[in-house]
Amino acid sequence: MIKRHTLIDMIMHWFNAVCWLFLLGTGLGLLHNGHLQLFGGAWSRWMRSLFGSGETLLLSHEVVGIVWAAGFLLYGLFRFRKAVWPFTREILTVSPKRDIQWFMKKGSQMNLGRGIMNKFGVDSQLPDQGFYNIGQKMFAVPALFGGILIAVSGIVMLLSRITVTETAWVQWAILIHFLCAGLVSGGLLMHIYVASFAPGERPAFISMFTGYVPEHYAKHHHRIWYESVRQASPGRGAPGGERK
Amino acid sequence: MTAKLAMVIDSKVCIDCRACKVACKVENKVPEGHWRNWIKQQMPSPEAVIDQPQNARLDFQPGNCMHCDEATCIQACPTGATYRNPADNTIQVNKKLCIGCGSCIPACPYGARYRHPEQKVVDKCDFCAARRLRGEAPACVVTCPTKARVFGDINDPASDVARLLKEKETVRVVGNYTDTRPNLYYVSTTAPMDWPGKAEAPTAIGFLKALFLPVVGVAGITLLSVLNMFARQLVTKDNNVDEEKGEKHD
């Protein structure tokens, strides 16, 4: 087994997951307008009746939003050099030659299947990937930077009732808050499917609770990372420990 | 039939004493520099003064939030904080749900809304909701010395407003741009008539409305793709072969 996640990272992952689902549900419920509604306004009505009223829905969204942002602020402060910076560097590192091919092939494989790909003479073998594959990076980048924008725009909206006098700030904050949440949510659907249901991904799901992935999984899915971990401690094969 | 509260104003008898403005300001603690109601003026034209000085008159027009049937402020509010009270057809602001974005302010052709400088949320005439709970008429109506402002339920045939609407010709002040079907009526004629502006949305909120469906659409397409993957996974074991046995590195 190879260590992939630290305990604090796993805690933050599930903290983030719970907050996100709550904030997404309540946030969509807060949009209550003929032009801005899901299912003909039904979602907003359900949320308001579930929470008792619009104002308790708003208050709950604000409180959980503050807890979420504060949690990540603390995490960012204490884990910047050990986790946040390496993570940011990893997700921003792309190799077009490998990654475009990986993305096209993996997308075809999952949507069409290997049989159809072979029929058209496409080799379905995937190029090697690092700690994250390009699909994960394409979700991680909007999740990180979108998350920061969501937090900042949320704070602007909160301050609107305390200090902000320029309403244009609040109006742009609403737009940014919505666009970022929408963008990340699209990726979130894919993330949840791949992690929870997709065949062959079970070890990654389990590793979010145990912190470890089997060696064959690391080798098959994240070969570049696997090689670097093995080289870092050659004597013990592919042991646990922090990634590079 | 539910109530429909409205005001019928005889602007001819208004003497511009501004007692209604003062009463409103005191009753609703309206902060300095802001008003929930107004009295518009129109000077007679120079020609009228010269040609028929005996008929030339200075027009006064008392007004406030018109609690419109086609409320552009409700259409502008993203959270539903501005809403129509179904019990009496008035437009109200839930100040605990208002986030102070101010989108509704340019949406009102009558300029009836302002952002309260201390509360930091929007404020406007609510037909004195607190007084009505005690069974009293709005402060501006009660205080008016010439009884220019008449208030009541136009769906109740016995009310003064219903009687006035039935017996007299009335007009509504609708500008050149947006007809919001206001619920303030003026007996016979009133002036000025062309002052209301255009209902407008702030740039960012315009973008939000334009981009809402595309963003939901992109998320929807992602969902369809995910469902397709899931369905494929259920009907074929193809993927398992890919992942578990078809490894090129072993």
Image: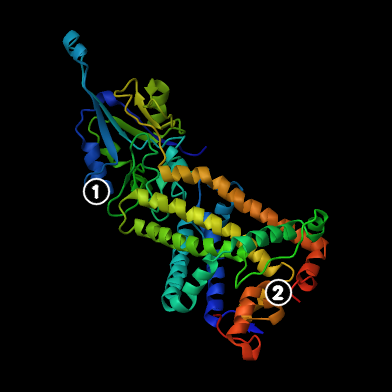
Q: Residue at x 54, y 67 (%)?
A: A91
Q: Which x, y percent locates residue A117?
A: 78, 57
Amino acid at circle 2? His
Q: Is residue B123 above or below residue A215?
A: above
Q: Is residue A4 above or below residue B37?
A: below
Q: Residue at x 34, y 26 (%)?
A: B186
Amino acid at circle 1? Pro
Q: Which residue is mark 2?
A: A220
Q: Which x, y percent locates residue A174?
A: 44, 52
Q: Nearer the viewer, residue B177 or B227?
A: B227
Indicate which disc residue B31 carries: 1
Q: Residue at x 21, y 37 (%)?
A: B19
Q: Is residue B236 above or below residue B164?
A: below
Res B197 visible = yes
Q: Is residue A32 left or right of residue B246?
A: left
Q: Residues within 10 Å of mark 1 (few under 14, many from 20)?
A: few
Q: Residue at x 54, y 66 (%)?
A: A93
Q: How far apart are labels 1 and 2 at the CA level?
A: 68 Å
Quadrant showing the C terminus of chain B: bottom right
Q: Which x, y percent locates residue A216?
A: 72, 79
Q: Residues within 10 Å of mark 2 (few under 14, many from 20)?
A: many
| Protein chain holding label 2 | A
Assign a secondary structure to mark 1.
loop
> Which residue is at the far bottom?
A235
Q: Nearer the viewer, residue B188 or A191?
A: A191
